Structures are given as structure tokens and as C-alpha cells.
Image (cartoon, grey):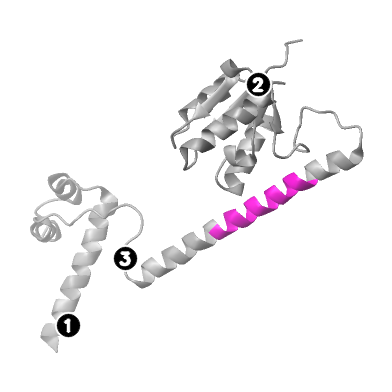
Amino acid sequence: MKQQIEYGYARKNTKDKEAEVQINALRQAEISPKNIFVDKAAERETFKQLIDVIQPNDVLVIKSLNQLGYSFLEILNEWETFTNILGTHIRVLDLPLLDTSVKRKHIGDSFVSDFFLQIISFAAQLERDRIKQRQIDGIAYARAQGRHLGRPRIPKPLKFDEMYDKWRAGVISAEEAMALLSLKRSTFERFVKERKEELKKDSEQKAS
């Protein structure tokens, strides 16, 4: 059976000293310096390297849950990545009960660990719901302000009205008009609809 290896991970947040505090804690936990991965940038390139190196049954050691992410949702996702997908263990130095590498003899310890993770899962779900609701509210507000959502709309070609008149007169086909204007059928049909509405309004104004 492969020997279990412990890897430490430290993550700089806002202060330079934060990473040093984490590294010192990992060293005191007897993590080999060569197995300590440190990120000092938001891209977390070192964290990605750690994921490539760590093997099933190895242990990821972190000082606190903040090293896994800035939000409950990110923490939960990373926890599941290591424990369920990669098949590794996690040991949190600031929370000794969160150590999946230890086989608990007392049901109380296991219960506390499971209960804590359930709280994280619940908080993550609340965070998902808040994000989703903010998106819904944002879309509703943008629409109320008359703002277009999604991909930027293609502006109507300058020669569209001319091509439209020729198409309606039977001088050119719809396919020829689309080719000359470099438009997809859906976009061409949208401009046709808008042009018909413009002509209808002009006709109504003249009649009145």
C-alpha cells in the first residue's frame, strides 16, 4: 500500500504575514517543507499544482477552512473535491475535529465533524440562493430600465432598408439580401420585423 503523505497548503489573503503564520503552523504540525504549497496570488496556481500532485489517501493539512475558499460555497466545493473526487483526507489545524484521516473511536467526535460539515452545506445552499436571487433581481431591474441583456445586438446595416425594398419588390431573394448584408436568417428576420413596424407607424401617422 502506498505510504500516506501529508501536504500543507497556505494561502495569502490580504496581509503578507498571513502566509507566514500559516506556514509556521504547518511546520509545527511536522509537515515537510518540501510538501508545503503556498499561494500568494488570486489565481491560485500553486493550489492547482497541489491538486495534480496529491494522491488518494494522502492528507491535505490547512491551518483554517479559509485556505479552501473565501465563501462557504467555495469551501464546500473544494472539500468535496479533495474528499470525494480525489479520495484524499483533510486536516484542519484550527479545528481538530475536522480531520478525516483519523478513525474516530467515539461517536461524539464523528457526529460533531459531520454536523459541522452539514452546517457548511446549509450555509453554502443559502449562499447559492442569495446569488440566484440577486441575479433574478438584477435581470428584472435591467429590463425595467429598458436595458438589453445577453449578447450585444448586431446593429442594423446601413443598406438594410435598401435591400429590404428590393427584396419586397422581388428584385432579390431573401437569401441574396442576407448574403449582401452578411446577416444570419434570425437577425435578418428580426430587422424585417422591425422595418415592418416602422413602415406601419409611418403609415398610421400619415393617415392621421
Whether pointer 1 and pointer 3 mark residues with C-beta atoms closer than 8 Å, the reply is: no
| Of the two numbered discs 1 and 2 in the rendering, the one whose residue sits closer to the viewer | 2
Residue nearest the observer in this picture, 203 or 98: 98
Q: Earlier in the sequence, mark 1 or mark 3?
A: 3
Which element type, helix, strand or loop, lies under badge 1?
helix
- For the view shown, which residue lies furthest in the right direction? 106
Relative to residue 15, is residue 172 drawn left or right? left
Segment tinted magenta in the rendering: 115-130
Residue found at x 64% / y 35% = 63
Q: Earlier in the sequence, mark 3 or mark 2?
A: 2
What numbered label is drawn on residue 31? 2
- Classed neighbour count for the residue bearing mark 2: other residues with Cα under 10 Å, few (<14), some (14–19), many (≥20): some
- Classed neighbour count for the residue bearing mark 3: other residues with Cα under 10 Å, few (<14), some (14–19), many (≥20): few
Mark 2 residue type: Ile
Which element type, helix, strand or loop, lies under badge 2?
loop
The image position of residue 130, as x and y in percent, is: 56, 60
- Residue occupied by mark 1: 204
* 156, above or below 94, in the image: below
The image position of residue 73, as x and y in percent, is: 60, 47
- Label 3, label 2: how many angstroms apart (C-alpha)? 54 Å
Relative to residue 87, is residue 193 drawn left or right? left
